[in-house]
Image: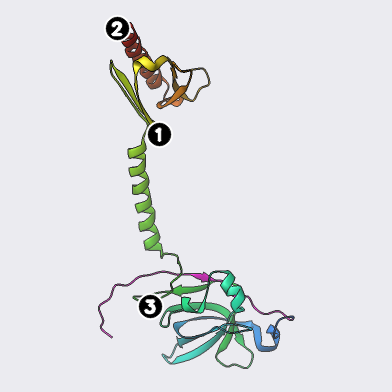
Amino acid sequence: MTIKRAVAMASLAVIAFAASAAAHHAFSAEFDQNKPVLLEGALTKADWMNPHAWIYLDVKGADGTVVNWAIEMGPPNALLRRGWKKSSMQYGAIIKVEGFAAKNGKEFANATNNAISFGLHGSKGFDNSGKFERGDQTAMIGLGILIALGILAFCRPRVIADEAHIKIRNVVGGYDLPWSVVRAVRFDRNSPWATLELTNDEQVSVHALQAADKDYAVDGVRALRALHSAAVDA
């Protein structure tokens, strides 16, 4: 088939519980724990019914022959509690399943407690959220770093002052104050940053001048005190 389409890659994990002896049928009666299988194929059918949901995959063998496998999953209610429903399953999605083969040698298996991975291509796939492939994860991490740097640049603490007023931008919130409402510029011992003591007895933090900045913070506080003093004396 030569159809132009965008390819979207995603995967989703669904946990399918194997039936116990007290369940609707005994696992050991039908499946062989010594015959693990790893199946990968296109979803052709999904039966959402009690006591167990079933999915059917077209699996290509080593000789190129395509065989339809039936995979027993967990009860529908258990799947629903994990956010799954029948409409989540789209035919044609490429699915990987780990499980155990039937004792009778026929093409059906029981899904293990391991993840069932869904690799989705084009317009086919699931309507639930998924996980990205390695390349997509790297791209998303890079994008996240760029976004974070942009946010930090925009929200970076800053203080700008002149002979008339002082403008403060903290991590959260900002202030534009005339020197006339400032009683003192303080940098108390053990304080993480400088503060302005206002004439109404409130305090305003100056996150741009932090104790960790050492000499830079000291010079900044001295400069602010000089501007404040000049404004008060004027």
- Residue 200: x percent and y percent? 46, 18
State whether the magenta stretch is mostly helix, strand or loop. loop
Q: Is residue 44 visible?
A: yes
Q: Is residue 148 magenta?
A: no
Q: Give the range drawn in magenta.
A: 1-21
Q: Quadrant of residue 107?
A: bottom right
Label whose residue precedes the other's in the sequence (1 or 3)? 3
Name the kind of residue labelled 2 in the image. Ala
Q: Is residue 7 left or right of residue 212?
A: left
Residue linked to disc 3:
124
- Identified at 37% across, 13% down, the residue is 225
- Residue 144: x percent and y percent? 38, 51
Label whose residue precedes the other's in the sequence (2 or 1)? 1
Residue linked to disc 1:
173
Return the residue nearer the eye: 167 or 32. 167
Residue linked to disc 2:
234
- Residue 202: x percent and y percent? 47, 21
Return the residue nearer the eye: 168 or 118. 168
Name the kind of residue labelled 3 in the image. Lys
- Residue 223: x percent and y percent? 34, 15
Return the residue nearer the eye: 180 or 14. 180
Q: Which of marks 2 and 3 is in front?
A: 2
